[in-house]
Image: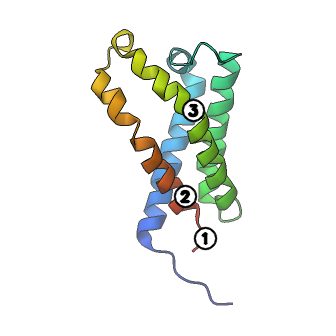
Amino acid sequence: MATTAEPAGRRWLRYGLALLFVGAGALHFLKPETYLRIMPPALPAPRLLVLLSGAAELAGGLGLLLPATRRLAGWGLLALLVAVFPANVHMVGLASALHIPAWVLWARLPLQPLLGWAVWRASQAT
């Protein structure tokens, strides 16, 4: 059976996303307080949610690297990006307490769909 060579750009995109998600996922365990600070107060069990989202990022990032799990990892990461969006919106209101300019956090919000597109693209079969 003949296989099509994967475009180098997609491969590097996948590696970059894997590094991003594995790194962010690891930080959920190494510095959970960072993520606890931005959790919307209406959500239950914030520490558990931080750890679960970190595990999901780790699994999704690693899953992008394996052809057998790539598509499922992509769908999982897309779901995760949707799930954490409320925390990103909540973070805008915390800008001064976080010592981050509000414009930076506002500018970050439209990047979420772009990151979602990148995940979708990287997780597609060649």
Residue assigned mark 1? 125
Comparing 19 with 40, the one in front is 40
Residue assigned mark 3? 84
Which of the two marks, 1 or 3, is nearer to us in this view? 3
Write down the quadrant of residue 2 in the picture.
bottom right
| Disc 2 from disc 1: Cα separation | 10 Å
Residue assigned mark 2? 120
Q: Earlier in the sequence, mark 2 or mark 3?
A: 3
Task: Give yes or no for contact between labels 2 and 3 (Cβ–Cβ under 8 Å).
Answer: no
Comparing 80 with 110, the one in front is 110
Graded by Cα atoms within 10 Å as few (under 14), some (14 to 19) or many (20 or more), the crowding at tag 1 reads few
Residue type indicated by callout 2: Trp
| Disc 2 from disc 3: Cα separation | 17 Å
Residue type indicated by callout 1: Ala
Graded by Cα atoms within 10 Å as few (under 14), some (14 to 19) or many (20 or more), the crowding at tag 2 reads some
Q: Is residue 92 above or below residue 13?
A: above
Residue drawn where x is 32% and y is 19% of the image: 100
Q: Is residue 85 above or below residue 111?
A: above
Q: Secondary structure at mark 3?
A: helix
Q: Earlier in the sequence, mark 1 or mark 3?
A: 3
How many marks do you count on the picture?
3
Residue drawn where x is 67% and y is 24% of the image: 49
Q: Quadrant of the C terminus?
A: bottom right
Residue type indicated by callout 3: Val
Q: Position of residue 73 (x, y in %)?
A: 65, 53
Q: Earlier in the sequence, mark 2 or mark 1?
A: 2
Graded by Cα atoms within 10 Å as few (under 14), some (14 to 19) or many (20 or more), the crowding at tag 3 reads some
